[in-house]
Amino acid sequence: MTSRYPVLYRSIQGIALLAVLLSLLVPGWLSSVQLIVALVMILLIGIPHGATDYLIFQQLSRPLWGSREMTRFYINYILLMAAFAALWWILPELALLVFLGISIYHFGQSNWNYVGFQSKLEAVGTHVLWGSFVLFVPILWHYETAAPIIGSITGAPAPQISGAWREAVSITLLVLNLWLCVYYFVQDKVTRKEFMDEVVNLFALALLLINLPLLLGFAIYFVCWHSLSSMMDQIRFFRRQVQSYNVAQYIKNALPLSLAAIGTLGVFAFAQVKMDIPLNIGIVFVFISVVTLPHMILIDQLYQEDNAVSAYNSMNKEF
Ligand SMILES: CC1=C(/C=C/C(C)=C/C=C/C(C)=C/C=O)C(C)(C)CCC1
């Protein structure tokens, strides 16, 4: 995926490696600033990357505009969020597993969406392997930090996993993902340059996710890798509908919902401070997962349409 936006990703990898260097030279300093740095990045880029969902939805459902189907679609979305919130209420451990599963697929899809897969199974397998790498490596490598967070999300203690197992799974995930790059290169699905870019990217991510404190490493991945590439892909998608669509317009479109989301979080935080309630990270996580679920489904539809258009274009080129 980094080959699609080379300048952006070379810069991000450079910044990530500088952060790794900083963590080795001044250990402890990044831990003390990680929460504020992660928060600022998520507010400025992480939240806005999901704030144009309403436009994607409008474009994807264009044939339904003005019909009753459209209202039914909105209602289904709200029902989906309500059902997921109910699952959190009744079976929090299952809800967490569902959310982790969909997140893994979503992260993998934002990296490997440019490859023409032979089957749905190949696509899902690839997305799951890549997404598992960026989600499980930081969680398993920094399990002493992750376990209490998981405990506060589910309300039950996180399972105990030995250090040897955690390291073995993390390294296996890296090796399997490297093998995936080789597989697609051998299959002629990626060019030599794309292959090299994927391999460099995997090592840069591994260094970042292992060396940086959990929340900072994951936030840098989530914001710089995932949210930025998702934003760029969304801009490409909108540009197909309106050719002059640009970054400034994207910012303008994302602003209202981003401000609404940031404002809501601000009110929550202010109320908690006023009432002297300690921050409940579990509730914040559940809230984020419920609003993120429709976003992930929508983006899946965006990539499916993207692939259909690419297949159509390459078919036309052949004839
Ligand atoms: C469980 C767990 C985590 C998982 C976070 C996830 C799964 C985030 C998914 C975000 C998505 C999918 C955003 C979409 O735009 C953290 C924060 C690493 C910390 C340790 C515990």
Image (cartoon, rainbow, N blue to C red):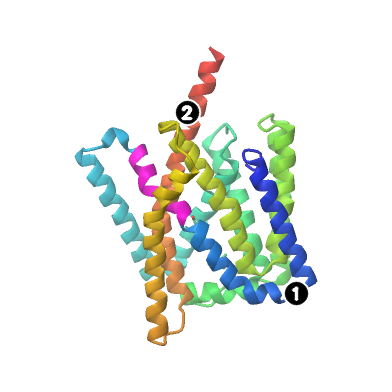
Was residue 56 drawn as part of the magenta stretch in this picture? yes
CA–CA distance between discs 2 and 1?
48 Å
Q: Is residue 114 above or below residue 228?
A: above
Q: Is residue 293 above or below residue 149?
A: above
Instruction: Answer few, some or many: residues within 10 Å of disc 2's Cα (few below 14, many 20 plus, some between 14 and 19).
Output: few
The foreground one among 36 and 157 is 36
Please name the residue shown 57% across and 48% down the image. 108
**Badge 1, how many Cα within 10 Å: few under 14, some, many 20+?**
some
Residue 61 placement (x, y as % from top left): 32, 38
For the N terminus, which image quadrant? top right
Q: Earlier in the sequence, mark 2 or mark 1?
A: 1
Residue annotated with mark 1: 27
Question: Which numbered marker is on residue 309?
Answer: 2
Respond yes or no on whether mark 1 lies under 8 Å from ligand 1: no
Element class at badge 1: loop
The secondary structure making up most of the magenta span is: helix
Amino acid of disc 2: Val
Residue at (52% x, 19% y) in the render: 315
**Nearer to us in this view, 134 or 4:** 4
**Percent coordinates x, y for residue 70 in the rendering:** 25, 42
Q: Amino acid at mark 1?
A: Pro
The image shows residue 71 at horizontal and vertical percentages of 23, 46
Label 2, secondary structure: give it.
Answer: helix
Can residue 276 be seen? yes
Which portion, as a residue range, is magenta? 48-59
Q: How far across and how far down the image is residue 109, in percent?
A: 55, 45
Q: Is residue 256 left or right of residue 97?
A: left
In the image, taking residue 294 as reference, residue 114 lies left or right, namely: right
